[in-house]
Amino acid sequence: QRIVSINLCADELLLRLADRKRIASVTRLSQDAGNSNVAALAAGLPVNHGLAEEVMAMRPDVVLAGVYSPQNTVGILRRLGVNVVEFDIPNSLDDVRSEIRRLAAAIGEPERGEALVRAMDARFATLAQRAPAPPLRAVVLRPNGITAGKGSLVEDIMARAGLENLAARLDAGNYLQIPLEAVALQGADVLIVDGESDGPPSLATETLAHPIVAALGRRVRIVSMPAKLWTCGGPNLVEAAERLVAATRGGGGASAR
């Protein structure tokens, strides 16, 4: 098979599951270490920009896409008889396991897919022994004041790290805005800033200078989380949970940035 991926999250699983010689192309974002967890694996491979003409020029047997891949490209490829396998956005670790197995089956590597799932589950099981108990109260702050709410993949990862997602109490939906006043009133122990502390300026990091955050003082631990760690399904999710546990061991009180 000649496999082409036009989705970053599919890139990350493909590069972990398939032999390099079978990969005809991955997205250009896969080689950007700021966005990709597998930039080293993607280095040197042909890249694409999600355009139908460049994908067809690679004579693919299978094209891996996502719900946010260019739908005009997906439609053209299907009309031309190309086998396009499209993946949804996972909202839980169960969804991630299903996505890994489905992609592995699509590229003829079911055993490697199962091995990846087992390895992730083993790491999560080990992590559970170190997670805070009882759970610490936490909230995620993304650019524009967006938070990760009830029923999201991020909430599932937080739970594995011994954190209760306060946004779920507010019924904020999967990814909606949350005011800092609500964070303060709910008694958060941990504020997770979605982004690197030394990364480009964003409204998420600017919020750290807000008077409400300053007033919370030493009681709240502020943790920076690279967004790429929990955007796509894969071993990076375990790394995200491990980062949370390492930053919050011993309870709140200090910044981990």
Image (cartoon, rainbow, N blue to C red):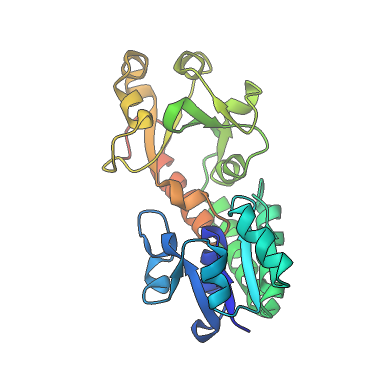
Q: Residue at x 54, y 83 (%)?
A: 19
Residue 130 pos. (x, y %): 51, 50
Q: Nearer the viewer, residue 123 or 166?
A: 166
Task: Locate the N terminus by quadrant.
Answer: bottom right
Q: Nearer the viewer, residue 245 or 214?
A: 214
| 75 relative to 39 in the view: left or right | right
Q: Nearer the viewer, residue 108 or 215?
A: 108
> Residue 101, can we see it?
no
Residue 162 pos. (x, y %): 55, 41
**In which image quadrant can residue 201 be found?**
top left
Residue 16 pos. (x, y %): 53, 73
Residue 111 pos. (x, y %): 68, 79
Q: Nearer the viewer, residue 43 or 112?
A: 43
Q: Residue at x 49, y 17 (%)?
A: 179
Q: Given the current orientation, which residue lies at the most extreme left position? A: 198
User: Eyeballing the image, is 15 above or below 87?
Assistant: below
> Residue 208, can we see it?
yes
**In which image quadrant can residue 209 be found?**
top left
Q: Residue at x 49, y 69 (%)?
A: 26
Task: Locate the C terminus by quadrant.
Answer: top left
User: Eyeballing the image, is 61 above or below 36?
Assistant: below
